[in-house]
Amino acid sequence: MANVERGACRFKAVKGPDGKATVQIELFHNTVKLLDGMSLEFELLSGSTIEQARALADAANDRVLGVIVSKG
């Protein structure tokens, strides 16, 4: 039987150390123990601007309730 955890999250546009724009998931209140100590980001297509990343993060924040993680 799979171990399933759910947690509230938000999306944030960030510029990585390499200068590329990414969209990062921030989990609230450490509710997803399977992801403790991990970070999750989405790599965007080459040439994506931070403004485009912000628009994508804003759209996701308007429509996504949370994250679902399962193991095994």
Image (cartoon, helix red, strand yellow):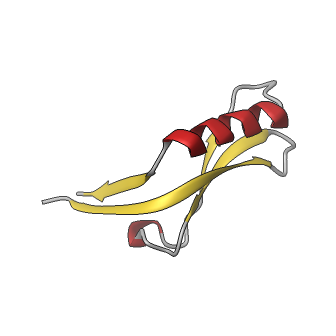
Residue 20: image quadrant is top right
Report x, y in % for residue 47. 81, 24
Q: Give the residue drawn at x 66%, y 41%.
A: 57
Q: Residue at x 43, y 53 (%)?
A: 67
Looking at the figure, which quarter contains the C terminus? bottom left
Q: Can residue 53 be seen in this view?
A: yes
Farthest residue, direction front: 62
**Quadrant hosting residue 18:** top right
Nearer to the camera, 18 or 58: 58
Q: In which quarter of the image is the N terminus?
A: bottom left
**Farthest right residue?**
19
Q: Residue at x 84, y 51 (%)?
A: 17
Q: Quadrant of residue 37?
A: bottom right
The residue sitting at 42% across, 63% down in the picture is 7
Q: Is residue 57 above or below residue 12?
A: above
Image vertical order of residue 56 relative to residue 16, above or below: above
Compared across the picture, whether 65 is left or right of 10 comes to left
Q: In this view, does 4 lie to the left or right of 65?
A: left
* x then y, percent, for residue 29: 52, 75
**Total label count?**
0
Does residue 56 appear left or right of residue 34 in this picture?
right
Q: Can residue 43 be seen in this view?
A: no
Residue 5 percent across, percent down from the top left:
32, 63
Q: Eyeballing the image, is 34 above or below 40?
A: below
